[in-house]
Image (tube, helix red, strand yellow):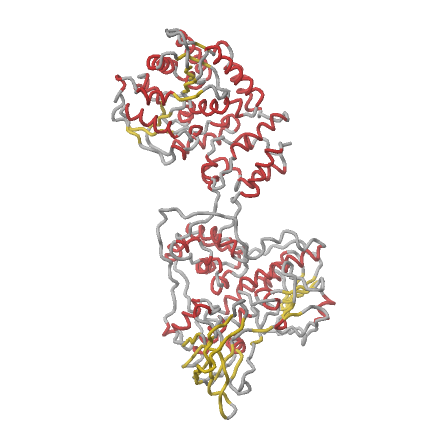
Amino acid sequence: MFSGKLLGKINEVIEDCMGDAPAYCSATCPLHIDPKTYIDEIKEGKYEKAIETIRENAIFPGVLGRICAHPCEEECKRNELESALSIKNLKRFAADYDDPVKWDLSKESPTDKKIAVVGAGPAGATAAFELAKKGHEVVVYEALPEVGGMLRVGIPSYRLPADVIDEEYSILEKLGVEIKLNTKVGEDISFAELENDYDSVFIAAGAHKSIMLPLEGSDLDGILPGTDILRKAGLGQDVEIGKKVVVVGGGNVAMDVARTVWRLGAEDIHIVCLESKDEMPAHSWEVEDAIEEGINVHCSWGPMRFEGSGGSVEKLRVKKCERVFDAEGNFNPCYDEEDNMVLEADNVIMAIGQSAETDFVSEEKVNKTRGNKIKVDPVTLQTQKDNIFAGGDVAGRPLLAVEAMAHGRKAAISIDCYLKGEDLYENREHEGSFETWLETEIEEDEPKRERVDMRMMPVEDRKGNFDEVELGFSKEQALEEAERCLTCECKLCVKECEFLDEYTEHPKEMLKEILDAPYGSIDIPYYCNLCETCTVHCPKDFELADIFLEIRRDYYQDGEGPLKDHNPITKFHQPLGKSGMFTLTKKDPAVEKTERLFFPGCSLSSYSPEVVTNTYKYLKDVMPGTGFLLRCCAAPTNMLGQTDKFDKMIDELVAEIEKTGAKELITACADCTHNLMNALPDDIEVRTVYSVIAEHGIPEDRKNVASGRVMSIHDSCTGRHFTDLHDQVREIASDLGLEIQELEHIRENTRCCGFGGMVVPANPDLATNIMERRASETDKEMITYCAACRESMTMVEKPAYHLLEFVFSDQWKEGANGNDNPLKQWFNRWQTKRKVSKVK
């Protein structure tokens, strides 16, 4: 099993990784629709796939695409640049491609449980859908002659056409949900009958009754409830309305009432509300649309009394409202009684809020609160009676349509758990809106793009009809708006790492799977290049390479690792690499004291004995007292997690260094440099040969030897943090006359060549993909300062050279060499030993 230290690192990633964090918009959405994904699909022209994505979380996309208050847009990251993405309107665009034939009507096996739903509004309908999908039998009781609840009779059809409601609601009957219209609970059927006939009841009756003000003159004719106006208009019934109308209220219902009576023939329409314009509860766009249609909005005025004669209202006297809320934030209006205004009116319509009609269920069954609302557990929506649940407007504050739908889903989850005898509180923390744990920043070069305006019916064409005002996006508009999406997500490591991209959605998922089954997929940790690219891109600086290396070490300790595919390394390469045939420890014979040793490493020695020998000669010339040490740095053993063998090889290496009296190693390989800096005792310094060359200069006869040649430098991933090294190799390249065409990913942000981490034998296909990706970043020949990196490039037929070839050899003039077979590489290494041993 994994060590405590390793478990701590893994759990830190699982707890804090943002790879699974929803985008700001999705987390805020009460239904957790995934705009990021469906907007990407719109960009790609996959409109049917986009609506499929939306339907995974919302059964009424056309409804929401028209009337959703889009709280998601308030949290859109784009607000920091100019304005939010038009998420609602893009949803509407996708919904226009919806096809009922393709709806998912699958259900779980029948449970023989029956649920009654009171109300076919957004909460009741969503609950019915979710419960039917769970295999339960569902019957909906609706007092109205049509489905939709307040969607039908509270939102005018110029905003939400009836045919959209009818089509999207048809999914309920397709799933086998029975809907009993014109059936009012408490009149046509008693609540007691529902309790008796069903295993559970969900009350989602809404809040349809307008609140009226008991002011002087309130008994005059012509004072009407706003919901009555909307109900009659929504059901296509006649509405008698005068020419002069005053609407009292500052919310969305007030705006809808005013715009409805304008369409019905009213000519002089005024809205009065207590709130200032900035305080109005109505959405700003609703107010703007009302004003555009010629409706007068009077803010900071409150009703004082109704005035009239002959039993009918003729005027509404209002008084100036100086404050709506007190210092504690409580509703407590303060008026200037002397500052009055009179508005003439044939009708005064009240739209200051609604109360629920819940007399059909007694308080012996459920507790009730102010406004005749039903008291529920906020987490489960369960009432005081276990099998009765309530949600939507009937169970608390007025909800947005999308919030009511989320209530319906919440109730369905609770009812399903209740019927199955499961815990109603388990895994409920991310229902409804929540704050995502995602943290992203907008790129500095992200251009500003203005929000695309919705096409609208001209105002002059709206009078006298209820045709839809918003006309939807064209394809061109939808694409333009979709391109504004910032695709907010983390997954920066996954986007950059071929290994993570192929095997997981995000590190949290992968590490959870490993933790759940440590020996289930033992090969996975060996697919990591250990290149630390993930850490470079991770906002949390998680060191996944370190975690995978620790896992390999624990596997080794438990006798489970390395993989059999690594046998050529563990049983042949490493033992042979430290045998006397291929190792050499040499003092500088020209001086009395050897102060440093040139350490070329395995790969360069196996590639070019000539380059190694000439480099050594150069070092002896510019820094007398330089000896030579040909051994493996033990990096392969370390990467495979064989800690004891690695420690032994390092001890042997230190012993060889101590024989010479040297206190410094000069390395030619970034991997050797990285490995030895971490493993050797502090009294042994490590520096690169490139720092020496940069300090002393290349040989005079090599200056501009490659003049005019254009190449790209590959920075070794193990040397990504050696910033001086990056400068030094480029300085050397410049002195050689090379013109460098830089890659996109260089220096600290370099990419792995594919050779690291011993991935090649474990997963050759993955390694090849990584090599090919790196090689494809340039159409120029590649130059490296790591022989293994050079080898990886040539493995995918990318012409590549070692920088030291240009400094100390002319073999590059014959063109890039391919890779020698393993036998030839071992022969080269033997040749290196032989040639260097003869250097005086």
Work out whether 33 lies above or below 497. below
Work out whether 791 lies above or below 227. above
Residue 692: percent from left, percent from top: 35, 20
- Asked whether, in this view, residue 443 is left or right of residue 68, the answer is left
- Asked whether, in this view, residue 826 is left or right of residue 590, the answer is right
| The C terminus: image quadrant | top left
Work out whether 738 lies above or below 154. above
- Asked whether, in this view, residue 371 is left or right of residue 545, the answer is right
Residue 524: percent from left, percent from top: 56, 33
How many circles with numbers are drawn on the protein?
A: 0
| The N terminus: image quadrant | top right
Residue at image position (55%, 87%) is 219
Q: Is residue 309 visible?
A: yes
Q: Is residue 236 visible?
A: no
Furthest-front residue in view? Answer: 327
Residue 28: percent from left, percent from top: 51, 56
Residue at image position (54%, 29%) is 549
Work out whether 521 lies above or below 506. above
Residue 753: percent from left, percent from top: 43, 29
Residue at image position (34%, 29%) is 727
